[in-house]
Image (tube, helix red, strand yellow):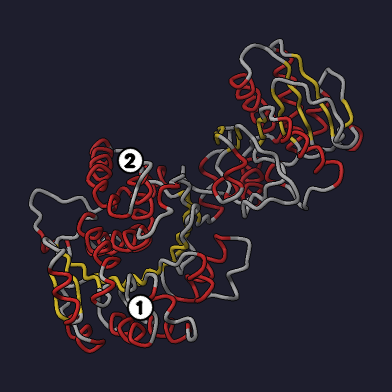
């Protein structure tokens, strides 16, 4: 069996500051800085050769720091293999220091001054200007050069991260290269996965440059790429001896008779996610509408917050979703509080979040002290209603972490780069490109999937991460033309693949 911690460690993401600490830790363990740079530059050269296999013309744009040093090494390696290599340097060779100066001293060719008007006629351009270590927005001559390279449509290989992309947030700082491929070192950075940075990276490759994995525990890292390796070992796969009662009982709170569709989407998703039983909690006027549409999902009468509280007093009902189609207002707030007073895991979605816009503190107070988890699934607009002071922060990971700590809940901030964060600081970024999810009702399906996994007693953070990943994978499998109803029907194929991978472990 593969080491569980190794699988998780491979998914860790390092900010630029944490990467610097990893470099220092490696050097403290006896691995020299020049060796790390030599290995990094050699890796860049390998990728350049793969992108330009016929010993063509390569232009290397080198910066004044270690990223530029990697560029000097790559340029030398390529020249030794018969490539025609030009190297343009930002600044003067005399001002280089440390390992970068050492790498430059071994470059046998000419050095051109870097400018916006430099000749860009090359088969491949290597961006070794700044990488993840950029300290300020690009402007002036450098920004003009970036724009000229992007306009040229020549393929770009970025070293570490496309220059101009913030390694922590994925934001564009002034201007940024649009790379066809990025080669980074040791581990990915948040800026590789967060938007818009991810759109500038092209294919992302992680090179082993000799930093030992043993340095990771000392860095106290709490951020991962969302991938089955993060949660596969706690995925609730049914055993031969299992039965439906052992797989939990999820409840979805229905909206009124004219708005039951969203809750029905969530309920079917909870069932497909593996919950042994799923019930719909409904006001009396919605029961006949629900009964006309549901088969395997049970319907339970629950009038008002009092009826819902009475229903959830049965501790066998161990996960509940409220929000899809619930309506915004006092009645929904009261039902949410009833859910939070139960012993069930609670998923707050859509209207359950927005209903607390005027008094978010009341929601957070109701969450405080619960032993069972609470999971919130806001999109950007809903997030801004509950956390208006955090909404404008440009670091999606950090604002989601702050929201989770404030709310005392797992927060799933949805989007093309969904971030899941726990109150204890753990966080994960999803980087699956699933544009087909941009259609009505898919969020309701996600809420139901989370509840279905939570009903099976999967740990809350991992349940949220797994549901987000499976949700996107289901969309990938269906492809164009997806509507929300299709997602649940794709989950058996998702489960089948995950189960086979678990067995292979």
Where, quadrant-wise, is the C terminus in this rendering?
Answer: top left
Q: Count of labels shown?
A: 2
- The answer to whether residue 154 is above or below residue 367 is above
Question: Mark 1, residues whose alpha carbon is within 10 Å: few (<14), some, or many (≥20)?
Answer: some
- The answer to whether residue 383 is above or below residue 203 is below
**Mark found first going from the N terminus, 2 or 1:** 1
Place residue 146 in its image quadrant.
top right
Residue found at the far front of this picture: 258
Question: Residue 306: x, y in percent?
Answer: 22, 89
Place residue 288 in its image quadrant.
bottom left
Question: Residue 96: x, y in percent?
Answer: 86, 36
Residue picked out by circle 2: 477
Residue picked out by circle 1: 327
Q: Nearer the viewer, residue 323 or 34?
A: 323
Place residue 322 in its image quadrant.
bottom left
Where, quadrant-wise, is the N terminus in this rendering?
Answer: top left
- The answer to whether residue 155 is above or below residue 238 is above
Real-space Cα distance between discs 2 and 1?
32 Å
Question: Residue 151: x, y in percent?
Answer: 73, 34
Q: Nearer the viewer, residue 54 or 248?
A: 54
**Image point (9%, 48%), residue name:** 240
Secondary structure at badge 1 equals loop
Question: Residue 181: x, y in percent?
Answer: 60, 32
Q: Nearer the viewer, residue 2 or 189?
A: 189
Instruction: In the rendered structure, find residue 473 and report the number of the disc placed on it.
Output: none
């Amino acid at each position: 069996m593969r080491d569980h911690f190794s699988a998780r460690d491979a998914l860790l993401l390092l900010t630029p500051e944490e990467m610097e600490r990893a470099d220092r830790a490696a050097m403290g363990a006896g691995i020299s800085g020049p060796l790390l740079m030599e290995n990094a530059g050699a890796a860049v050269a390998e990728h350049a050769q793969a992108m330009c296999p016929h010993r063509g013309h390569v232009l290397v744009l080198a910066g004044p720091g270690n990223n530029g040093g990697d560029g000097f090494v790559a340029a030398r390696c390529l020249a030794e293999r018969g490539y025609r290599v030009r190297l343009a340097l930002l600044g003067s060779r005399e001002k280089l220091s440390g390992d970068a100066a050492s790498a430059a001293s071994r470059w046998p060719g000419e050095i051109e001054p870097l400018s916006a008007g430099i000749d860009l006629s090359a088969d491949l351009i290597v961006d070794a200007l700044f990488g993840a270590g950029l300290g300020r927005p690009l402007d002036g001559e450098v920004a003009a050069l970036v724009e000229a390279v992007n306009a040229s449509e020549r393929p770009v290989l970025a070293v570490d991260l496309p220059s101009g992309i913030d390694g922590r947030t994925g934001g564009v700082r002034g201007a940024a290269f649009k790379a066809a491929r990025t080669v980074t070192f040791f581990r990915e950075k948040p800026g590789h996965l967060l938007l818009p940075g991810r759109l500038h990276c092209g294919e992302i490759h992680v090179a082993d440059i000799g930093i030992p994995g043993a340095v990771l525990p000392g860095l106290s890292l709490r951020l991962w790429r969302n991938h089955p390796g993060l949660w596969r070992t706690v995925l609730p796969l049914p055993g031969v001896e299992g039965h439906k009662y052992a797989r939990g009982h999820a409840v979805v709170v229905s909206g009124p008779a004219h708005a039951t569709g969203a809750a029905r989407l969530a309920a079917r998703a909870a069932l497909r996610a593996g919950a042994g039983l799923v019930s719909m909690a409904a006001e009396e006027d919605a029961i006949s509408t629900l009964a006309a549409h549901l088969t395997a999902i049970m319907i339970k009468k629950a009038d008002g917050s009092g009826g819902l509280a009475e229903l959830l007093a049965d501790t066998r009902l161990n996960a509940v979703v409220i929000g899809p189609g619930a309506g915004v207002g006092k009645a929904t707030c009261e039902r949410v509080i009833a859910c939070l007073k139960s012993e069930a895991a609670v998923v707050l979605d859509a209207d359950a979040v927005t209903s607390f816009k005027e008094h978010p503190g009341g929601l957070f107070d109701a969450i405080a002290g619960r032993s069972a988890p609470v999971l919130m699934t806001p999109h950007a607009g809903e997030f801004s209603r509950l956390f208006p002071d955090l909404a404008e922060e440009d670091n999606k990971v950090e604002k989601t972490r702050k929201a989770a700590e404030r709310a005392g809940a797992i927060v799933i901030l949805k989007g093309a780069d969904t971030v899941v964060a726990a109150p204890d600081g753990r966080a994960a970024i999803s980087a699956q490109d699933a544009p087909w999810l941009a259609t009505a009702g898919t969020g309701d399906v996600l809420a139901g999937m989370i509840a279905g996994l939570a009903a099976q007693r999967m740990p809350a953070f991992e349940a949220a991460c797994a549901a987000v990943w499976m949700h996107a994978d289901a969309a990938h499998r269906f492809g164009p033309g997806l509507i929300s109803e299709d997602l649940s029907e794709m989950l058996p194929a998702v489960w089948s693949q995950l189960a086979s991978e678990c067995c292979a472990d």
